[in-house]
Image: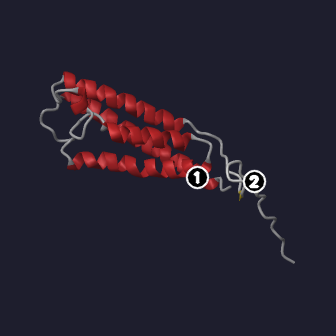
Amino acid sequence: MSARTVPEPRLPSATSGRCATPTTVTPPDHRVFAGVVALAVLSVGGAVISVAGGLSSSIWEAMGPTGRLSIPIPMMLAQLAAGWLAAGSRRRPALVASALLALVEPICIVSGFYDGGYSDPARSPLHVAYQLLFVAAIAVVGVLAAVRFCSLLRRRG
């Protein structure tokens, strides 16, 4: 005889009155969000260095699409939102957000080769050093997101 599986209980939803399956809850992991926040701080710091060093004329320009030492503001806001979701206890949003960050961070690194960010002759040795630190931080966030994604995959609920 084969073992029968018991169906998952269905609970009435508070908003619709219909039955819904319970949300899968996982332990929160704030490392990804902390990494993205550190990346945002480094991005703002890079914008300040960019303006002080003459690479950009304003903070807005430094944090725009032509910025060399920072992430554009819309992308940074999207990464902060994804980092917050990836760190949360709801499995599905955390899974999607951590996968998204794990895919986007390497793309951010590679894009610097194509937009001229790594070969700008106006960069000083300080700019190059900061850019290396910044790229390393982006890579760390990508690794943290991949680790979170893998840990969520192992916790199939």
Depth check, mark 1 against mark 2: the one in front is 2
Q: Relative to 150, is 39 on the left or the right?
A: left
In the rendered image, the quadrant that contains the N terminus is: bottom right
Q: Judge the density around disc 1: few (<14), some (14-19), many (≥20) Cα neighbours within 10 Å.
A: some
The image position of residue 37, as x and y in percent, is 44, 32
In the rendered image, is residue 69 in sight? yes
Say what amino acid the circle numbered 2 marks.
Pro
Residue 30 lies in quadrant: top right
Q: Judge the density around disc 2: few (<14), some (14-19), many (≥20) Cα neighbours within 10 Å.
A: few
For image coordinates 23% across by 36% down, the residue present is: 67
Considering every residue shown, the one lying at the far top of the view is 52
40 relative to 96, above or below: above
**Precedes in sequence: disc 1 or disc 2:** 2
- Residue at image mark 2: 12
In the rendered image, is residue 126 in sight? no
Which of 77/145 is in front?
77
Q: CB under 8 Å between callouts 1 and 2?
A: no
For image coordinates 58% across by 41% down, the residue present is: 88
Considering every residue shown, the one lying at the far bottom of the view is 1
Whole-number angstrom distance, CA of label 1 to CA of label 2: 20 Å
Residue 71 lies in quadrant: top left
- The label shown at residue 92 is 1
Which of 20/127 is in front?
20
Structure colour scheme: secondary structure
Say what amino acid the circle numbered 1 marks.
Arg
